[in-house]
Amino acid sequence: MRLTVGVSEMCISKNPGDIIVTHALGSCIGLAIHDPVAHVGGLLHYMLPLSKIDNDKKDIKPFMFGDSGIPALFNEVYKHGAKKESLTVVMAGGADILENCNYFNIGARNIAIARKMFWKNGIMITAEDTGGSKPRTLYLEIGTGKTWLTSGSERTELT
């Protein structure tokens, strides 16, 4: 079954037949994590790096922000038996969609918050396709742990 993760959403699955997908990763980040031993995986699509800009919104939509969505994603797969040392972590997105406008730098800031949180928690990124100016769609196949992305007519295998 294909499960779609919208903007500011997250999905976890233990069903080997599931493929989780998120579309329209411009400056947003898609994070796919998978534990091949526990047979669980999840995908997060967050828009903004820090929730401090709107604590009320964080309470309603924690997956909108990297600093609240990333821990929620990891905690949820841990609840389903995943172990930190078994996880593969794939990151995509963080594009500069307004190419000549570096004023907000949302894409770069989204990438930075993820890397900072991973570094602080001893988590290695297995594969990534970030930055640039192209939009991406990220896929995670639960049964195999394979991840890939598409952008236009291009398909890139990540794991």
Image (cartoon, rainbow, N blue to C red):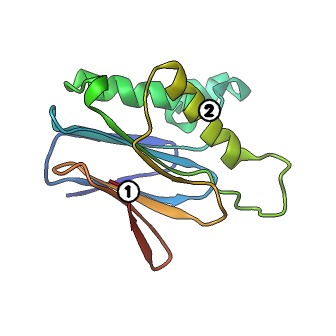
Foreground mark, 1 or 2, reads 1
**Residue at mark 2:** 113
Pointer 2 local density, CA inside 10 Å: few below 14, some 14–19, many at least 20: some
Which secondary structure lies at badge 1? loop
Identify the residue at the far bottom of this view: 153
Indicate the quadrant where residue 50 lies. Answer: top right
Image check: 63 left or right of 34?
A: right
Residue 124 screen position, x and y as percent: 43, 33
In this rendering, the answer to whether 104 lies above or below 69 is below
49 or 155: nearer the eye? 155
23 or 121: nearer the eye? 121
Q: Residue at x 51, y 42 (%)?
A: 8
| Sequence-earlier tag: 1 or 2 | 2
The number of numbered discs placed on residues in the rendered structure image is 2
Residue 22 screen position, x and y as percent: 42, 55
**Residue at mark 1:** 158
Which amino acid type is marked by label 2?
Answer: Ile
Q: Residue at x 51, y 63 (%)?
A: 136
Which secondary structure lies at badge 2? helix
In this rendering, the answer to whether 44 lies above or below 2 is above
Residue 49 screen position, x and y as percent: 64, 35
Residue 5 screen position, x and y as percent: 40, 50
Which amino acid type is marked by label 1?
Answer: Leu
